[in-house]
Amino acid sequence: MKLQSKYADVVLNLLVAVAISLVVNFSYVLLMLVDLNNESTQQQPAPKRALIREDEGRLVVHPDGYGYLVYENGDSAYVPTQRMNRLRLAAGDRIVAEMTPPRRPGAHPMMQKVLMRNGREFDYSMLYSRPSRGTELLLQLIYYLVVSFVMLSILTTVRRNYSMSRYVRRCLWCCAAAAGLYCVAPVTEWHTGRILLNCMSGRMFDYMLLLKCSFAVVVSMLYGWIYVLISQRQAVVVENERLKNENLATRYNMLVGQINPHFFFNSLNSLAMLVRERHDEKALTYIDQLSYTFRYIIQNGQSTLMTLDEELKFVEAYSYLFKIRYADKLFFDIDVDPKYRPWRLPALSLQPLIGNAVKHNTITRSKPFHILIRTEGAWLEVANPKIPKLEPEPSTGIGLENLNNRWQLITGRRIEILDDGETFRVRMPLLNPES
């Protein structure tokens, strides 16, 4: 499933990159289609304005850079500087050329095309071999496809916990990648027609290329922002479903784990001991506390929040069962500020902590065991010393993990678990009933 999802993202990014590339080159494609249409519908060739002069003219270069073709009869034709440079003409060359007639009386004709140079036919292929417009279009489409795909890949590689800060960082990476790709963009050299990398063209700041690359980057970032919103929404839905399932499983495990046979049989054994020793009053009190404990667990197993006062009443009944079992060996030190008793916490938060403390530590008459329950500000803390048993009970950590998940699900906050090797403490944030 993860592999399919990965390939689905790649395919989607590729399709979006193709769309961006087509949009960026839309004008280029449109012009190419118009030219092809004109070529297919053109019936007669347009009249040529250029005139061919059969005799040779000698090229004279003016100190300002431009030149003239001077003929034996005294005529002359103007040669632009750019054309001399592009065709690599030199002073003294004997040239037969096409001329553009002068635009106004008294002006010089202008050299249009060189036919022969120094008695030889002028070969334009020696200067450059210009690629077809189809080749140029294909290169442009592939380049902007690569640019867009790289941008989209950077922006959409994160599927979970895609926050605004991550999006901003990835946008910065996109800008850095775009700058590198801008340097290797294919451009056509204006005076030779050769296709070069932008960094080799001598014109790094090509405004049209910069505009197209900027458009591709901006559209990719907009798509990335949409991806962020969709990912966050999906993450919320998935997380809600996960937490719902986890809450159901936690509640079930909590009820099954808390009303387990060991606890039940130990309680019955303690009750039988009281009956055998004829401690009738203690036996009746034990039955009351035992029934209260089981009733509280069953009734509040589906509850979300309880007041601290109700939880402490449950702890009083629950701890009484352990006190009978561990006579004069187990003590509960409760130090709770009365003002926090109306504050709330998830139901049955204290029971697994007490159960774990008793389960994993040695409790003897020579080493009485103390469990501390106190408030520290708006936090409820449960602490106990670490006195490992000689044969430790197996521990999976599921109880604390479930407790932490329940707190996050119900309150949106996590508990703090502190273990310094000597004391094990769990701190839980209480909820103000007025909030």
Image: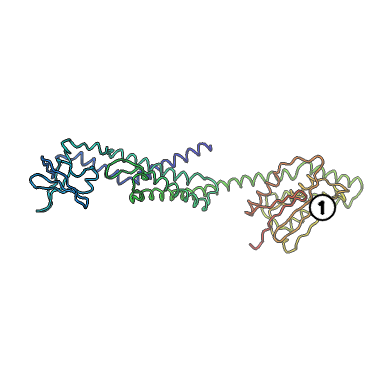
Q: Secondary structure at mark 1?
A: strand
Q: Amino acid at mark 1?
A: His
Task: Assess disc 1: are there few (<14), some (14-19) or many (≥20) residues with their C-alpha within 10 Å of its C-alpha.
Answer: some
Residue in view at x 92 percent, y 48 percent = 278
Q: Is residue 253 shown left or right of residue 101?
A: right
Tell me which corner region of the image, top left, top right, bottom left or bottom right, holds residue 19. top left
- Return the residue at label 1: 370
Residue in view at x 38 percent, y 48 percent = 213
Q: Nearer the viewer, residue 67 or 349?
A: 67
Q: Return the x and y of residue 104 as percentages of the image width and height.
A: 11, 53
Q: Is residue 170 shown left or right of residue 183?
A: right
Q: Return the x and y of residue 307 as percentages of the image width and height.
A: 71, 58
Q: Return the x and y of residue 39 as percentages of the image width and height.
A: 20, 40
Q: Nearer the viewer, residue 2 or 121?
A: 121
Q: Nearer the viewer, residue 10 or 303?
A: 10
Which residue appears farthest toward the left when viewing the image? 73
Q: Is residue 28 shown left or right of residue 299?
A: left
User: What colour scheme governs how the chains and residues are painted in the rendered image of this protein?
Assistant: rainbow
Q: Return the x and y of residue 168 as percentages of the image width and height.
A: 49, 52
Residue in view at x 79 percent, y 52 percent = 371
